Image (cartoon, grey):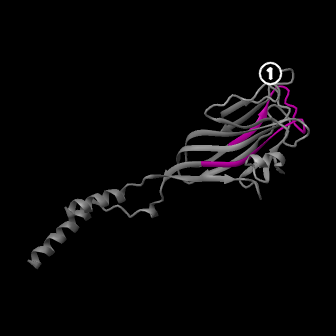
């Protein structure tokens, strides 16, 4: 029985299970660490009552697509089951399919488009789905006199390899007006994933030869005591 217990313990020690890890987090209360490109810190005004804290990252850049706010990451090892979550605000007069739209908010990971949503201040709230939850719609939250919207976004990004990665947040649309007429903001950005625990976190695996040698020494010691 003791030998079986030793073997089971060694087998458990030799395995390196995946563990959930916070890979990046920022609520923009004091800095924009990790971000480059367009965007600036601003007070949340009415968004503060929706869990946005006191500051958020706002982007009012023009263009189609508009200049992105870019999160830059670098992993020492591969991560799996990565999930990106954030609070999102569609500020002011976002247009659906009317004369001045559409207006899209996009998320691109390493050049691949992972999320695109047309937000609309005038025709209706964006349909809730697995990636999108509504916090507020058509509410005056304090930006430039137009009504605003707020959502949470959750995206499963799957596996990300070791090395550098970029996550781009940007607006687009044929008549994206930008400035104080249309802009967006994000807050509470978090990226979580699973990666192998560092080797230092578990005992070094014992080879079969060493194990057999140890068991043989134990048996020899017992014979001598007998």
The residue under the point 91% across, 38% down is: 145
Q: Using the image as rendered, state which of residue 51 and residue 192 is in the foreground.
A: 51
Whether residue 144 sits left or right of residue 69 in the image: it is right
Name the magenta segment's main secondary structure.
Answer: strand
Stretch of the chain drawn in magenta: 167-191
Instruction: Residue at 76%, 56% (x, y): give it.
Output: 29
Residue beneath the point at 13% across and 74% down:
222
Residue 13 picture location, percent across and down? 36, 60
Is 146 within the magenta? no
**Residue 59 location in percent, x, y?**
82, 43
Name the residue that disc number 1 marks.
97
* Nearer the observer, 152 or 83: 152
Q: In which quarter of the image is residue 113?
A: top right
**Label 1: few (<14), some or many (≥20) within 10 Å?**
few
> Residue most toward the bottom?
225
| Location of residue 183 by image quarter | top right
Residue drawn at 65 percent across, 44 percent down? 85
In this picture, residue 75 sits left or right of residue 60:
left
Q: Eyeballing the image, is 54 above or below 146?
A: below
Looking at the image, which residue sits at the far left? 226
Question: Residue 182 magenta-drawn?
Answer: yes
């Amino acid at each position: 029985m003791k030998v079986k217990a030793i073997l089971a313990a060694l087998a458990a020690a030799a395995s390196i299970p995946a563990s959930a890890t916070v890979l990046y987090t920022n609520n923009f209360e004091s800095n924009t660490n990790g971000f480059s490109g367009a965007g600036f810190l601003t007070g949340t005004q009415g968004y503060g009552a929706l869990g946005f804290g006191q500051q958020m990252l706002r982007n009012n850049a023009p263009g189609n697509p508009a200049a992105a706010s870019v999160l830059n990451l670098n992993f020492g090892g591969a991560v799996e089951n990565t999930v990106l979550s954030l609070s999102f605000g569609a500020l002011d007069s976002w247009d659906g399919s009317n004369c001045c739209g559409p207006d899209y908010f996009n998320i691109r990971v390493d050049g691949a488009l992972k999320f695109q949503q047309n937000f609309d201040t005038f025709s209706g709230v964006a349909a809730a789905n697995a990636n999108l939850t509504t916090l507020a719609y058509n509410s005056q939250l304090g930006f430039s006199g137009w009504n605003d919207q707020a959502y949470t976004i959750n995206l499963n990004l799957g596996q990300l390899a070791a090395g550098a990665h970029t996550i781009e947040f940007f607006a687009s649309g044929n008549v994206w007006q930008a400035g104080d007429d249309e802009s967006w903001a994000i807050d509470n950005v978090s990226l979580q994933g699973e990666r192998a625990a560092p080797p230092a976190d578990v005992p070094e695996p014992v080879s079969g030869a060493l194990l057999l040698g140890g068991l043989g020494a134990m048996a020899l010691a017992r014979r001598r005591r007998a």
